[in-house]
Amino acid sequence: MKNMIKGAIAGAAMLAASMAQADDDVTLQLKWVTQAQFAGYYVALDKGFYKEEGLNVTIKPGGPDIAPAQVIAGGGADVVLDWMPSALASREKGLDLVNIAQPFKSSGMMLTCRKDAGITTSADFADKTLGVWFFGNEYPFLSWMSKLGLKTDGSAGGVTVLKQGFNVDPILQKQAACVSTMTYNEYWQIIDAGLTPEELVVFKYEDEGVSTLEDGMYVLGDNLKDAAFKDKMVRFVRASMKGWKYAEMHTDEAADIVLENDASGAQTEKHQRRMMSEVAKLTSGSNGALDVADYERTVQSLLQAGSDPVITKAPEGAWTSEITDAALN
Amino acid sequence: MNWLIYALIFWLASWALNVRIANSAPSRFKSILVPMLFGFSLLGLWEGLVSGFNISPILLPPPSMIAARFASSLPILWEDFVQTFVKGALSGYFIGCSAAFLTAIAIDRSDFLKRGLLPIGNFVAALPIIGMAPVLVMWFGFDWQSKAAVVVIMVFFPMLVNTVAGLSAKNEIQNDLMKTYGAGYWQSLLKLGLPAAMPFIFNGLKICTTLALIGAIVAEFFGSPIRGMGFRISTEVGRLSLDMVWAEITVAALAGSAFYGTMALIEKAVTFWHPSQRS
Amino acid sequence: MTSRTAALRRIWHRAGPILTILAVLLAVWYASAVALNAAWAKDKAKRADTVLTFSELVSDTMSQDKPLLPAPHQVAEEIYKTTVLKKVTSKRSLIWHGWITLSATLLGFAFGTALGMLLAVGIVYSRATDMSVMPWVITSQTIPILAVAPMIIVVLNAVGVSGLLPKAFISMYLSFFPVAVGMVKGLRAPDQMQLDQMRTWSATKATSFWKLRLPSSMPYLFASLKIGIAASLVGAIVGELPTGAVAGLGARLLAGSYYGQTIQIWSALICAAILAASLVALIGLIEKITLKRMGMLS
């Protein structure tokens, strides 16, 4: 009896102690389903990097119909991952999204084409059918096409665009000459399906000079006025980047952590491990801080998108180095 | 806050008015006026709540904004309507319903087939067929053909089950009467079986109108050309143009109601003799 | 002996046609699998510079990793692997995913039935409700809710309603309609004579509702419930599509589609079908028992 009371008191004391320094809650909304593209965050969670910073992080997986910007506007998340073109377009719609960190240095987006469809250079695109992702991911493609001077409305001499579903079927079944792929994901699905690299031509957005910044961390500008929130973000960015750097060093372990967290049970180890090693190439160039030159290039490419530009004027206050400056020192 | 109070007062007032009208002597005009009034009061409430609670238009735009968007993007809405409704839904509806109708007539003569197909048809009609959409898009390509295919499969079984049930609706006495007249199979089908089946057939046709529209729109989520109502809805959500999304929803609701209404009118003209159409 | 053969004949009379048609469907399925998957097999062989014999071709079409149409035994094998061989708590177990979908379905169905019954009572007893709400109840079903389900889920998620509730909301929207319509029909089923009789017994409105209208609406209610629960399941599955492919049969469908894993798609589809059939059968059973107890079933 005595012991029980003692135990209860000790338990209550521990509870009180943990209450006193309760971790700050942070909710992160991913851009897509749980996969190695987001390994850094899962590693930071799994390895306790967030815990060390006194954060209690919840990671919400995304999906084909989830717009991170909409989630943060409704207060469903503190931080969202988004691509810069779509984030800047949301800004023009009146949603004050601010980039606080940019773990992805290079773009992994490319257009993968079949050689037997008659494509060897970008000059061959005219009058072909190209598969494109929409839902805010079409902007880089549109600005590239307008740079090439190709119309996307299906008229003669232009290209026919089709909205690609969630997979690479259009190229396998020859419904499209090219499909959009990421270096770390869909490209390998094509290879897995039986086409060989020799049968394919790839156009990396990075090589074509039309690359835009991908997975960045965005928060609402209003929240940044709050010192407590800022402090939370500094710790969040620091722990996340620690997670990313760990994932780059230990790609197989990181992929396994991602698999552990995949609730759909649909991911395979082979695919995730390969994805992780490809993703590591894209993140390795960044310590988390946004490179202003990259930002300017993205903005220029979006502004120049021909008759139907993605954004109409250069945005102001769309990024801040405050968080990363404090986090990475 | 004021907005909220106005909206509530507006809604309560129109409800009170509705109760008064509804309890007065009925007339044809009133039976249209009352639901209209109710609909408008709901729109008013919506507008008031959105303004009152300061809800971001990225989450839920007010009706006025949707109406403005609707008016300014008529050409796009029309293009999407043609792609999804006329090409996808209507052609699939037509093919699916006629195929089911012909199948029903074919199996009506065979008791064996009827006993085998009906339980299976009932089973399939209850299935989440919409799950077949990604598979059919894979098979039939991206354009409207795959959407029509989804619609065909969605409407086939409800239509089949209803038509078969309808063809068994004639009773023995009527059947015997046809025999005493010396009517052949086709004659008695045309003069007795089909007319007797009409209420059931139209029940199936009406159910299928909404299924057709849903099938055509949802199938576009799994791959489509860059027009169509489903394409526009999913793309504009991504672009945070929720006013455009709701404009498309309005088009879908209008098209769906008109489609259903047309079928109901044809039913009235064809089955004027049935008890449910009198009164 | 004769009674035994008679019993057998009766069973054959009922099950024979169904089994025959199922066998035909299975044969068609196999034939389509060969036809649809042949192009890929030939393409692969051509690129490898080999020529396939017919039997090689057939066996290849039956064993592809990502076939256009998987053969029935491939699907059966996958279902067996993901139900019997996996722990129920495993995220790769179809039973686990089925349970998630089922719980949203049942919750939505309960909401939908309650809403449908309330509406029906309101419509039968209030003229104003009848005139103003009924047309909109019908219109509500012409809005392709399934098409905008993703958006509704995201908006509800954004304002903090997440988990089961948003999915249950879609299920409710789909299932309240048949219940309301069936219930209105049922509550109005007693004819004038019966209503007059209640009045001669000076029954109150409440008594005549509990003793006459409600009991006589039961057959209509059960017919509607069967449609309603099937609709609920569809709602729950579609509601799962956009929630980030987290869990549930709908998420399996989506993830399968995203990674081109057709065998996984088909096994999720078949599981959904089995679930739908069992739910409808369950309602049918409850219907039989209830109506028997009420003496409405001979």
Image: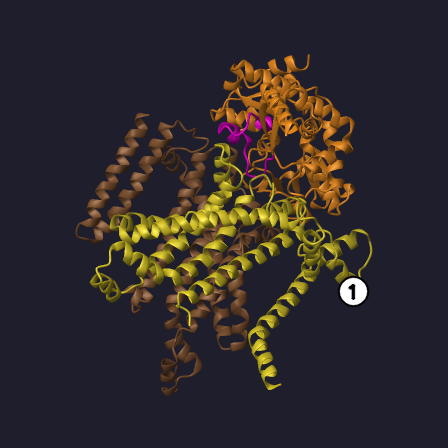
Chain colours: A orange, B brown, C yellow
- Tag 1: residue type? Ser
Residue A184 lies, in percent from the top left, at: 71, 35
Residue of label 1: C55
Q: Which residue lies furthest to the front in this view?
A: A1
Q: Identify which residue, A307 or A161, lies in the foreground.
A: A161
Q: Can residue C80 be seen in this view?
A: yes
Q: Quadrant of residue A232?
A: top right
Nearest the eye: A165 or A305: A165
Magenta residue check for A67: yes
Q: In this view, does C79 lie above or below B47?
A: below
- Any magenta on residue B26? no
Residue C91, horizontal then vertical, whole percent: 66, 44
Q: Considering depth in this image, is C71 or C132 the residue closer to the camera?
A: C132
Residue C256, percent from left and from top: 64, 47
Whole-percent x, y for residue A182 in the image: 68, 35
Quadrant containing the N terminus of chain A in the rendered view: top right
Residue A120, visible in the rendered structure: no
Extent of the magenta region: A61-85
